[in-house]
Structures are given as structure tokens and as C-alpha cells.
Amino acid sequence: MFTNRAQQCTDELDDTTPLPELTLYDMLETPSDEQQSDVAADTGDDEEEYEDEEYLSTSANDSLNTPRPKKPNVRILENKRLTPGAPIGMALKNILGESVKLVTTPPKTTQSTEIKILNKLQTKPIKTFSNTAVKIGSTTIASTSASAAAAATTTTATTVTPKQIRGITMTQIKTTDGKVIYLQKSLPAADAQKLPVGVTTATTTTTTARLTKTVPVSSAGIRQTLLPKGVSIASTGLIKSSAGSTPITVRGITAIGSSPTKISPNATTTVTATLSTSPTTSTAGAVGNKMAIQMVRTADGKLIKLNQGTASMLLNAKAAAGALKATTTAATTTTAATTTTDTQAKAVGSPVIIKGALKQLPAGATLKTTTTSASTATSNATSPAASTALPGGKLLVQSAGKQIVVASKNIIKLSPKPGASGATASNASIQLGGKSGGVQIVRVLPSNKSGTSTLTSPQNVSIGRPRTISSNNSSSTSSNNNNSSNTTNVSITNAGKIVMKTMGGSIVPLPSMQTLVSRRGPSGAANITHAKTPSSQAQPIKHRLSDLNVQIKHMTGEGGEGPDAKKARYVISMPRVPGAPRTTPVTQQQLQKLMATRPSQVKRISLPSPVRSSKTADTSKAAADSDGGNSTGRKVYNLITKSNANGVKYMICNKTSEGKPHSVYNTTMRRGYTLNDPAKIRRGVPLTVQQAKLKQMRLQHQRKVLAHNQTKLRQAHLQKQQQKVKPTQPQQPKEQQQQDQSTQGKSGKALFDVLKPPAAPAASALDALGGSRRKHCNCSKSQCLKLYCDCFANGEFCQDCTCKDCFNNLDYEVKRERAIRSCLERNPSAFKPKITAPNSGDMRLHNKGCNCKRSGCLKNYCECYEAKIPCSSMCKCMGCRNMEDRPDVDMDSMDGLNDAKFHAKHKDVNGTQENRSNLYLTDEVIEATIMCMISRIVMNEKQNMALEDTEREVMEELGESLNQIITFAKEKNDTKQQDETKAAT
DNA sequence: GAGTTTGAAACT
DNA sequence: CAGTTTCAAACTC
């Protein structure tokens, strides 16, 4: 796999542009939602950039793998962008001097680097050394004097008086809350001359909360400035920061050379450092030789050190506020250790940052995090992370009981260090969801943004308790100040990304390390638990992205949950009688009891958030099918998703520990899967697999009950009639009935099984195949990376397919992700369900509609017909015969029926509709139905359920009862026809 | 199993 | 957005 992945990095025009973590959530969210990136909340989020168009353009451009000048724009978050020609650009130039090269390049060539500064607010008076205002839009960053009021709403014509800090010309920008941002006004002459036009170098920007302990920040050129929410540039010319530790992000500040950075013990500002894509070796190399370390301190006192190297990874070390004495030099390192443009280009495109870190880190490059914190992170902070070269091109980084193995691929493997203590050590490690003990693997996602990727640069990893791990040779990172959780953010943007965030970031563990596992548990109640083992014994099951999407939404929607809530592994235990077969025998007595207490059997089961909507406990066959016919099977999914508010992203890979991908769904994956048929849920309503199946279980349970009720009533009715006709044999029916009961009880066959219609062909086929997948693609030209391929369209990996040149597998994950993105670019709804029901119980509709011309929409060419739904106004079909007004059309039971049979049946039913209504809609049946509804009401009232829920469930009850009646009537009708046919023959 | 038909996806 | 091409599944023989 690694080899393949490496090859990917060089093929296709060297298009190694890393794809951003493509989340299913992204797929399903509306664009507007995607753009609603709460930067302020997402303090460490630098992975969201791909969501904007700039990223896309950059990405596209990166595909050419051509070095590009950077876009010298300064922009403010929330769509306040500034271009070089904009006032901010001019103002910055005024501040930074002529040495700042604001290169005007097409927007698509933008390579955005980023510096994020997390500020912890302080109320210090503002003092600025800069007397030049920076105007951003209508606002101005003033740096006229210590008086904030002196700043005008417009640009002041004052010039910056550069401040010399350690020989570096700095420009100070002071914020209203006392923070001071130093920007290197100009590069050292030597370095500046080395810089080619349009190329910037590393920059370190630091803000401190105290004037007396300001941190110099070098800046060779500010190309972008991002001010997240909560930080504004006031008309007074000051950077304002809202309460809390709102991060201030300065994006695109690049610098050259290393600058010493001091962080005062009480400094509450995070320094982020960036680096550039500068191909100049001199600067980068010089810096690298110096092994400058970039120190970052988070708003909550965490200390982050960035080592030199292309894509260093930052990990915070928690430190008590005021006690932190970490001092280090700001690291401005570039990984571009090459002098040639070509090499640089390749480096940029390299998707693996840490790749190739074969040599041991120099001692100076080892991160040292000093802290006096007595917290559990102390061990981390005081323990310098050490890296050791391992065979096979791996880099072992150890820290506080944890080992991080940085493979030659974009993978970081986290495994417990032998002898390391459990809980404490776990705090000191990169964790996925706070899990400890197991091997954790984190994928390093390459970034196509600016920056270079070096294959030889050693990587340092400092592991600390803090959440933010971010490193970047060209971009900065920010630390998360959330102390309440054990989340960890790892992000390496630029040449490579380590994206490992559980809070506000992305988690991209290796396949099989995070799996969404669904299995049947022994307990009778449906519940969902977190799996404790990364590996699973899952049967090959395919999954659907859309299903998982919803689930992950639930999973990640609980912002207040602990780290375990972020785990991507879930074991869903379905209700089942312990030891009972899938089709649990139900005696009539049981059914009667069930009938009497029916609502309680359909009681709501409070599930954890991921499957909170699941309510029903059932032992029906549907439940058995929910795991693909394998009670021990687990569904292992692969997808990337993220949460809504917290920005949590998961990549859940459907790969077993053996490396073989799973097939989540054991069903055919044709287009137009519908909700009611779990075997065809490909683009059905966006319910989770579990939800859909639980719903089906619930419905089947209701059918059981209703069928039992009907049977009981019919038998009573029949008994009456027989008593009337044959008064001499009054006991026969009763005896027969008892015998039936006994037989049923012995045979384990439920009454419903007697009454229920034959299983749908799809389900039958599914069962016949023992849960194996029925269909496999046969793509030959699309490489299974286009929507032509059903596997791909379903969000699955190809498995056991007969396709040729298949790239739809883990070995070509990059290509696959790119293809997904391509599809989404063409059609953002490409992976959304095509067939949805507006509301529960509503008729399903094809969202797009078919476009059939010749098939009359009566063949499986038609997506509507295939989905067993009538064509709607959305369709553009010609000569459509897939009409809606077919009262007998039970689309879910039409599998295998040809048109002739269909129409014959149609005609027959219509012709005798009234009679059959009288035949089956007897008073007893109606009474039973009403009883069911009343029982539901009573039970809901006992449970103090909301009226709306009660109403809804009562209506569902009615609907299911009617459905059952229809099913029963249909079956009887068919039986009758068969009997008539036999009699005729 | 080969060839044809069909309509969605992709492309222009 | 419309027309055309490509593609793979559905269908036919």
C-alpha cells in the first residue's frame, strides 16, 4: 500500500496534491453550511481551508505541481478578503517596507500560509510601536501610539518606526487588549536578496500579552491575514479580541530566517509559525542548521514547540499559567532544502510530510517542552520527545510513555510504550478520542497549500497533554485552549498535514483504526457502545456513506461528551433474546401477552446519541438481517466525516486488521436504494443503517402483533361460523387451534411467519447468499472512480468485483478521494441520497427524477422504477408508465414481478376492490387496529411522552396496521388465485 | 456469454 | 444549459 501510495505521489502529472479530508458530512451538507466555518470556535482549525473556493483553485493548480508565487492578499476571515491592491495590502507594505514583496498573482496560484495566534485576552493597555495604520477594508490597524484612540478609522499616513529586536526590524501592532504583534518589517538584506520575487520565507509571529515581554516576530511578507471571529480590527486601528481565548489568526505572514521568540511565563498568546515554500536553500538551510525551535504558547498556558523541519508537529504541553518558563527560539524553518524549482515542486506536492524521516533527529531538533505544571501532562512536558530512526524508513518518536512511529508514509503510528503507565501516558500521547492503550495510527494528510515537503527533514514531535498538535513548515497552527477535554489536535498543513483533531479539527486515522462497528449484542435492549478494540472480526460488509453520515452526525453532535464520544468505533447492539434464534419463536400466548403490552414492547430505548432515534427492540428477522445475516459480523465503515460544531472529523476506514477492506453492506448496491428495502439503501433516505433497520424491526414487530391480532380474530370468527354450521363439532377448531399453537411453539415458527407474505425477492436472495454481497461492479474504463461505478457511487470500496484497473480501494486512497472531490465539485449532491422521503411515512421520491425515453420507466434502466417508486414531476421521462396512481402498487414488494403480472394484478385488484375491502376490513380487524392505537396512546401516556410523539406513533400504528392488512389481503388474494389456477387445471 | 439497449454520468 | 460522448448496467438472444 505504501508503495502504491508513493507511486501516486508521482504519477498523474505529479499531482500529489493532497486532498483535504473529505467528509461525508461535507458531502451532505449544504454549501452554505460548509462555508459556515466558525473559526473562532475552531481554534485550531486550519483544515477547513479546502472548503472555500480558494482551496479548490489552489488544489487544482497544485495538480500541475508547479511552483507558484503566492497570492499576496491579506484577508480577514468571514469573507473579508483583501487583495494586494486593497488598502490592507498597501498599508502592510507601508508597514513592512519595500522588502515585503506583495506579489500579485492570479488567485488560483494562491498558496496560503497561515499564522494563527491564539490570544488569551488581557486587558492591558495597548501600546504600539507602529505608527502606521493598516487599513483592512474600512477598518484600520493603527499603531500610532500607545493611545488606542489615536488610531483613526482610516489609514494614517504615519510611517512605521521599525523596532529593532535582536537585529531584526520589527513592526509592532498592538491590540486593544494589550497584545503586541511584532512583524518583521524587513528582511535582513542578505536574506532578502536571496529571496526570489514572489517567494516568501518563514515567518514567526508572536503576540504576547505583556508589553514587557513581547515576542519579536519576523515577517518577511504578509500576504494574508486572517482574523477569526472574535477578533476584529477596530476603527481605532487596534486589533480587538473578544473575551476568552479567541484566536487571532494572521494568515500568510511569511518570514525568513529564524527569529528568537520569547514567551513570557504569563504569556497567553500562542505563537504560530509558518514557513514558506521558498525554494531558497540558503535561508531554509541556515535556519535548519541552527535548529531553531519555534515556541508556541497557547492561550491556556500550554507550550508548544515547533522543531525545525518541514512539517514539524506540534504538541502542546500543558503548563500552569504563570509557571511556564519555557523559552525557546522561534523556529522559522523551511523544509525546502532544495535549490531547484523542480525539487521544490515535488516537495510541494508530496503528500507526506513526515515521510522519509529516516535519520535521527538532531539533538537540537528535539522538542523540549518545559513546564512546571503539576498536571498529568507534566511528564510529557518534562520529557523531551526523542526520535529515533527505525528500519523501514520509520521514525520513532517517543514521548512520555508513548511512541510515535512515523512511517515512511503519511502515517503516524501511536503505540503504547512498553512499560508506560496507562492513564498518565495516555495523556501524553496523541490520542484518538482519548483512547489509550491501543495502537493508534494517524494519517498524515498532505496539504496542497503552500509549503514544501521534505523527504529528509526529520520530524520532531512533542507530545503533551494539550490538544493542539500542529506543525507546519509553512503555516502556523494554533493551540486549543480547551482544557476540559482530552482532545488532541494534530495538524500539519502545508506540504503535509497531520490532521488529528478531536476538537475542531480532523481525525484521519488509518483504516481499521477507527471503525464504525455495528454488531448484535446479547442484551435485549438496543444500545450502542464504544468498541474497545480497534480491530474487528467483522465480516466483509460494505457501507454507505450516506448512512454513515447521519450516524456520524449523531456521533459528533454531542459536543459535551467525553473523548470516547469522539471515537469512531461503535458497537451497536441490537435487541435480541439471548440465545434465541433470529426468528424468535413466538407462541400465541406470547403474542397475546405481547398484544396486551404491545406499547411496552415498542418502548423507546434511550440510546446514546449516535442512534438515539432508534427505538425499537425486536427480535424479528429484520433484526437478524441488520447485521447481514451474521450475528457476529460487524459493520466496518470507511469514511471521513466531521462534526458540526466541533469540527470533529473522522475517517472511518473499512479495513480489517488484516488489511482487507470490509464490505459493510452485504447487499446489492444498485442505484436508487430505498429505505424500506435495506438491501437497497444506496441512495435512499439518509438514515443510518441502524436507524433504517431498527425502523424495519419496529415495523415488523408491529406487523407481527397485528397479524396475531387478525389471526386471533379470524379464528374466533371462524370458530363462530363453524359452531353455527357444525354444532356437533364445536371443539374441532379449538383443538386444531391448540394444536397449531403447540406446533408453532415447537417448531419455533411465529404466527406472523405463517401469515406474513413471502419475503421480498431481494431479501430472499440476500439470505440465500448468506449475507454476502450480491453485486459487484464490472467497470472497465472508469477505474471505479466515477459515478458510473456503483461501488464508488455508494461510497464503497470495490471488493470482489470484476472491475479492471480498479482504483477504488485503499491502495489508491488519494486518487479515490480526489475522485470524490471531483464528483462533488461537479455535483455537490452526488453522494446524497437520490431517493428520499420528505418526512417519515411520506412517499419516497427521486430527488432528481429520471430521464427515460424508451423504457417507459418500467425497466430497471429507470432509477425510479428500480427504486420502486413512481415517477414524479421531477422526472423528465417520456412515455412514462411508472405512474403514481396505482393503488395496488406496493413498490416494496414488486421485486421480480414482470409487467404483465403487474398489470394483471393491478386489474384484478381494481376489479374486486370493494369486495376485498369487505372481506378483509372486517369489524374485528378494525377493532384490533383501533385497539393497537389505543394501547399505544395509553402506554405513551404512562410514559409521559409528548403529545406530538404520541400522535405520530399512533399514526404510524395505523399506517402499519393498514399495511399489514393490505399485505395480508394481498397474500390471501394470491393464494386464492393459485388455488383457482390449480382447480382450473 | 456476446451483443444490444438504455439512461445516467461525464464531457464539450 | 443543451447536445454529445462515455460508461456500465440491464436486457436480449
Image (cartoon, coloured by chain):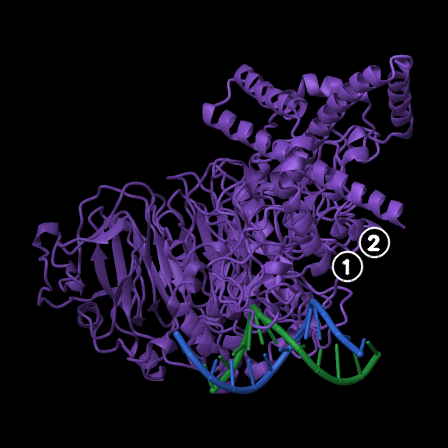
Chain colours: A purple, B green, C blue
Residue A769 marker:
2
Is residue A6 or residue A789 the one in the foreground? A789
Mark 1 — residue?
A774
Is residue A931 or residue A717 the one in the foreground? A717
Residue A219 percent coordinates (x, y): 31, 68
Circles 2 and 1: CB distance less than 8 Å?
Answer: yes
**What's the residue at 67%, 57% (across, down)?**
A511
**Label 1 CA crowd tier, 10 Å (few <14, some 14–19, many 20+):** some
Left or right: residue A709 versus residue A462 is: right
Residue A408 percent coordinates (x, y): 65, 68
Left or right: residue A110 versus residue A742 is: left
Left or right: residue A2 versus residue A107 is: right
Is residue A859 or residue A471 the one in the foreground? A859
Above or below, comparing residue A526 to residue A519 in the picture: above
Residue type pointed to by label 1: Arg
**What's the residue at 51%, 21% (across, down)?**
A945
Residue type pointed to by label 2: Leu
**What's the residue at 75%, 43% (across, down)?**
A625
Is residue A136 or residue A812 the one in the foreground? A812
Let me know if residue A476 appears in the view. no
- Asked if badge 2 and badge 1 are on a common chain, one would say yes
